[in-house]
Image: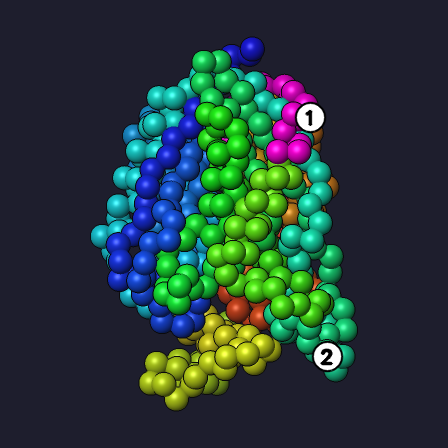
């Protein structure tokens, strides 16, 4: 065993009934709690400290995330750059966003206390540890949601079996990564890195339900299968990936808890098949870095702002009703979200200071992007990485929306139209992450 020590902590963050939910333009308030939400945390210590924490929420805006990191860092006596706060991206969690629906400010304020409690538990749980790594592919579990249509247009989620689909715009990222941690006199810790939107669960028993979606199912299945183990699901760069193969005509409902459980079992099953064959990797000191960069925002015209105001007013008054079926519903959501984004830019077009972050523990490294990069961005970071074992994460240390690739901006579509940023943002963030990884590898 090296001098590396690793610990685990967990805290229940389930909100109360009646709170507004995030991840859907329809008005949803929690009616039942199907399965609890958690903040799950792993702490690495070896001549330095890094804390990776995952919240079962859709995303944590930077103005909420930065105070959480500072609060946890102060409670542990480290620096904010050593704290990594990420989201699993479940769409059946509490609303944390400004916009269409109210937020529970008291709940949001409590998140930093939950985070500190989970982090302190992890640090108190530090035990001598050995890391093992494995990677593989898991086909037919995550799918590209952007398609070239026969008329030449590009649509997101055009509908399963839509006869007008020509081909997907790119290939899905079906790679899966495992960091297995064994510890002296303590249970294993299992970190899983896969990429897919956690927007599987819609309603349960026809009620709006709190659920950790398939990421929670992954953790539960693995924890039940490996005695004494604790698990964290680390969602990757999934901005353009979903759970349904829209090229297929199927009766299987991919928008329900049963499919979330299917995904949880399938991902966990793959991890179990990789578990015993994971190879030991070198520990080494813990190092963390971040870089904050200014990214140019779109600048809406007065005509665009006026049109956007009308769209939002019509939606709130009931004049603009979202269609129920694809592709119409996705076109309506695009129109509504684009209007909301442009109005926000019109009110406050201050260029955001976006935090790209990374840490390493010997041969293992993590790169985090604060939003939803396309899967090609994750592939680019891993291909140019400097570590034999690496995770690439979205929605880490902030949630600033979509980061499409350059070619996606050229053809437009849902993600490009609802991104706050100008073309080139995805590649810039990938290059920044690679810069941090290179510096960490040279230390």
Dot placed on the residue nearer the N-terminal end, 1 or 2: 2
Say if 151 sits above or below 120 in the image: below
Point out residue 156 in the picture as x, y percentages from the top left corner: 62, 70
Classify 10 Å Cα crowding around label 2: few (below 14), some (14-19), many (20 and above). Answer: few
Secondary element type, mark 1: loop
Please provide the residue range marked out in magenta: 272-288
Q: Using the rendered image of the protein, determine whether residue 357 is visible from the camera's viewpoint.
A: no
Query: Nearest the camera: 415 or 255?
Result: 255
Residue situated in front as seen by the camera: 427 or 158: 158
Magenta run includes residue 280: yes
Q: Is residue 366 visible to the viewer in this orientation of the structure?
A: yes
The residue tagged 1 is 277
Point 35% across, 21% down: residue = 124
Please state, as top left, top right, bottom left or bottom right, where the C terminus lies in the image: top right
Which residue occupies 30% across, 30% down?
A: 75
Residue position marked by numbered label 2 in the rendering:
164
């Amino acid at each position: 065993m090296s001098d590396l020590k690793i610990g685990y902590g967990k805290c229940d963050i389930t909100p109360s009934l009646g709170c507004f939910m995030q991840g859907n333009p329809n008005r949803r308030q929690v009616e039942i709690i199907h399965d609890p939400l958690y903040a799950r945390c792993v702490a690495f210590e070896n001549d330095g400290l890094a804390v990776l924490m995952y919240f079962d929420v859709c995303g944590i805006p930077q103005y909420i995330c930065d105070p959480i990191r500072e609060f946890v860092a102060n409670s542990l006596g480290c620096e904010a750059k050593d704290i990594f706060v990420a989201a699993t991206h479940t769409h059946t969690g509490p609303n944390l966003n400004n916009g269409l629906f109210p937020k529970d400010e008291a709940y949001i304020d409590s998140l930093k206390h939950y985070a500190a409690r989970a982090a302190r538990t992890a640090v108190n749980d530090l035990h001598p540890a050995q890391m093992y790594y494995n990677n593989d592919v898991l086909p037919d579990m995550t799918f590209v949601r952007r398609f070239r249509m026969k008329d030449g247009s590009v649509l997101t989620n055009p509908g399963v079996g839509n006869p007008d689909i020509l081909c997907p715009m790119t290939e899905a990222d079906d790679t899966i990564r495992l960091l297995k941690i064994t510890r002296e006199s303590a249970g294993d810790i299992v970190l899983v890195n896969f990429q897919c939107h956690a927007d599987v669960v819609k309603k349960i028993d026809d009620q709006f339900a709190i659920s950790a979606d398939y990421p929670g199912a992954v953790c539960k299945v693995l924890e039940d299968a490996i005695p004494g183990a604790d698990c964290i699901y680390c969602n990757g760069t999934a901005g353009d990936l979903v759970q349904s193969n829209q090229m297929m005509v199927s009766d299987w409902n991919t928008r329900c808890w049963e499919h979330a459980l299917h995904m949880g079992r399938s991902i966990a099953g793959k991890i179990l098949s990789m578990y015993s064959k994971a190879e030991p990797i070198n520990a080494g000191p813990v190092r963390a870095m971040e870089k904050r960069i200014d990214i140019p925002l779109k600048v809406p015209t007065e005509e665009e702002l006026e049109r956007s105001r009308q769209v939002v007013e019509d939606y709130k008054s009931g004049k603009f009703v979202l269609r129920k079926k694809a592709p119409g519903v996705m076109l309506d959501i695009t129109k509504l979200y684009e209007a909301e984004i442009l109005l926000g830019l019109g009110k406050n077009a201050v260029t955001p200071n976006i935090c790209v972050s990374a840490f390493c523990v010997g041969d293992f490294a993590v790169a985090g992007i604060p939003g939803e990069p396309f899967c090609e961005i994750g592939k680019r970071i891993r291909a140019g990485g400097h570590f034999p074992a690496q995770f690439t994460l979205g929605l880490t240390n902030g949630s600033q929306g979509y980061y499409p690739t350059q070619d996606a901006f050229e053809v437009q579509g849902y993600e490009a139209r609802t991104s706050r940023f100008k073309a080139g943002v995805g590649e810039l963030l990938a290059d920044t992450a690679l810069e941090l990884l290179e510096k960490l590898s040279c230390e």
